Image (cartoon, grey):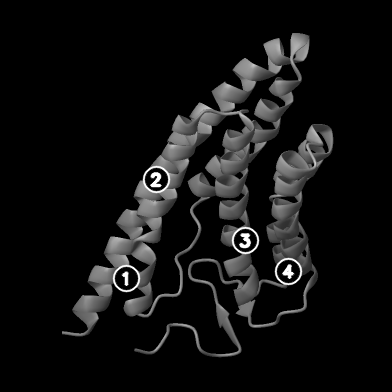
Amino acid sequence: MARRSVSTSSVAAGTGQVVSHRVFTLPNLVSLIRLAGVPLFVYLLLVAHETIAALVVLAVGASTDWVDGQLARRLNQVTRLGQLLDPITDRAYIVVTVLALTVSGAVPWQLTAVLVAREAVVALSIPVLWYHGYQSLQVHYLGKTATFVLMFSFPVLLLATVGGVVQAVALPVGWALALWGAALYWYAGVLYLIQAAQVVRAARRSLR
């Protein structure tokens, strides 16, 4: 079955933004650098046991979540690769980071289970979308908001492991952000599944 996007450039639905198939762009480079920060964070936290350095890497990765997307839009460099890299990087930061934090003892396994279960549920829709010719769906703003809140909560929860007064302040703030982010993350996931069901139904009707 033919994919919906096969030309060297296309227009993103509902945005009027031209989407190219270029690879070497500044926004894509930023996304790749952010993605490289994930294994670096894991190494610093679990292998080198450099908590402060890991905290810095995590904080930088979380705080620059919006940079690649903003650069792509402002420079008119929205690419298909960038549209794939952005959610992959976000998911890597959430899943890998929370797993590493669980192994280190910074967060309990229950939070990890909630977030990983959400990713697994949404991932089940991807092969179905591919089968019907859709490579991906438009990222919902609630999903981006949830990702930002979660990625901001992780450095705060890691900071709480320092102990003392820092822990007394960072722990409740980190958990407030983590719980809020997890709830938004699941809500965004449900919206994504609803959207996926709608486009699949539309694709099936078009074949009748």
- Report the Cα–Cα distance between label 3 and label 2: 20 Å
Disc on res. 28: 4
User: What amino acid does circle 3 point to?
Assistant: Asp
Q: Which residue is nearer to you in this view: 37 or 84?
A: 37
- Report the Cα–Cα distance between label 4 and label 1: 27 Å
Using a 10 Å C-alpha cutoff, classify the residue at mark 3 as few (fewer than 14 neighbours), some (14 to 19) or many (20 or more).
many
Q: Position of residue 140 (x, y in %)?
A: 48, 53
Outermost residue, left direction? 208
Q: Residue at x 59, y 36 (%)?
A: 103
Q: Position of residue 191 (x, y in %)?
A: 37, 50
User: What amino acid does circle 1 point to?
Assistant: Val
Q: Which residue is nearer to you in this view: 157 or 163?
A: 163
Nearest to N terminus: mark 3 or mark 2: 3
Mark 3 or 2, which is nearer the eye? 2
Disc on res. 11: none
Quarter of the figure that contains the C terminus: bottom left
Residue bearing the label numbered 2: 117
Image marks 2 and 4: residues in contact by CB distance under 8 Å: no
Nearest to N terminus: mark 4 or mark 1: 4
Q: Residue at x 62, y 66 (%)?
A: 85
Mark 1 or 2, which is nearer the eye? 2
User: What amino acid does circle 2 point to?
Assistant: Ala
Nearest to N terminus: mark 2 or mark 4: 4
Residue bearing the label numbered 3: 86
**Residue 194 placement, left or right of 110:** left
- Report the Cα–Cα distance between label 1 and label 3: 21 Å
**Residue 129 placement, left or right of 169:** left
Residue bearing the label numbered 1: 128
Q: Which residue is nearer to you in this view: 155 or 96?
A: 96
User: What amino acid does circle 4 point to?
Assistant: Asn
Quarter of the figure that contains the N terminus: bottom left
